[in-house]
Amino acid sequence: MKSNNSIYSLIIIAALFFTSCEKSINVNVPPQVSRLTGAIIGEVGTPLYVTVGRTAKLTESGISTDLAIRDAKVQLYEDDVLAETLVYDSSVASYPSATITRPGHRYKVRIAAPGYEDAEATETAPTLVPVTRVERQYDVRSMDGSKQDAVILTFTDPPSPNDHYVIAITGPQDSFQYHGDFCVYSPDPAVESPQEDVTEGSVCLHSYGIFLRDIIFNGQERAVKFYVEGGSLGPYYNGTDSIYAHITLWHVSEAYYRHLQTLQVAFDAGNNPFAEPVNVHTNFTNGYGIFAITAMEDREIR
């Protein structure tokens, strides 16, 4: 019993010792500056829709927080000439424009709102890059016991350097059926993954976002090969018609390319407690968000 009393005494003394060593530290957190945000993702040959908001403060939480700004002054410039001042339209929850974007022209969006520093972003509308052909080859390889088809997308890259592309492969879908994201593999050295080297053709790429640049094929015809499980491509018969999978080629700017890559990494890291923090790329000055104009070509995979 004496031994137990001695142990209890030592525990109490140790607790008092460590308690006496505690020190309160006051941390002065600098005030957080809320900034404007903008989201403009348009397509060549169509008008733009500008969504304006603000960044949330540390004291704000919950999905009910309204971050939209409906009284901003939004100006759209074409080739450095003011084209129009946009007005908020509640029916589309954005600031719609009447200007039709044209390939090769430079556009700037400038946003001003009371209490915020002005934000702006610039984008040059890309040219359409036509798809020459799409070919499907059945059961060309096996992976983990599953048969895979090859999908070969062929297009001719423009002679200008530094062209960026995003490719999406979607399963057959109609108003009654939808196929979500699935794995796509590619042995093409021009295909990039935001996180891994893909030249082995064994890295799972998201079917909704496959990235490649023209560094090694500038100005040339390129046939890019992908491997996909045949079941993901269908086709699907809805009782009336056959619904086919699609492959889409987006010609995009470097800014939008980097935005989508970092967004994909952030999405993948969302449920990983060990993942590094990811800053999603923005092309706004004095604000956050993305201004992108794309040129898109879509084809069926038969």
Image (cartoon, rainbow, N blue to C red):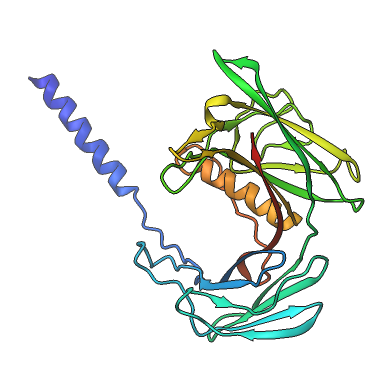
Residue 215 image-quadrant placement: top right
Residue 189 in the figure: left or right of residue 109:
right
Q: Residue at x 59, y 38 (%)?
A: 207
Residue in the image at 58% along x and 50% along y: 263
Observer able to see residue 33 = no
Residue shown at the point (53%, 86%) measured from the top left: 114
> Is residue 249 something that shows in the picture?
yes
Camera-side residue: 177 or 182?
177
From the viewer's perspective, is residue 129 above or below residue 206? below
Residue 192: quadrant of the picture: top right
The location of residue 232, given as percent across then percent down, is 53, 30
Q: Position of residue 123 (x, y in %)?
A: 74, 67
Depth check: 273 or 135 in front?
135
Please say if 137 is above or below 48.
Answer: above
Quarter occupied by the C terminus: top right
User: For this view, does 228 lie left or right of residue 160?
Assistant: left
Q: Quadrant of residue 150?
A: top right
Judge left or right: residue 223 versus residue 247.
right
Q: Quadrant of the N terminus?
A: top left
Of all residues, the one furthest to the top in this rendering is 145
**In the rendered image of this protein, does residue 154 appear above or below residue 283?**
above
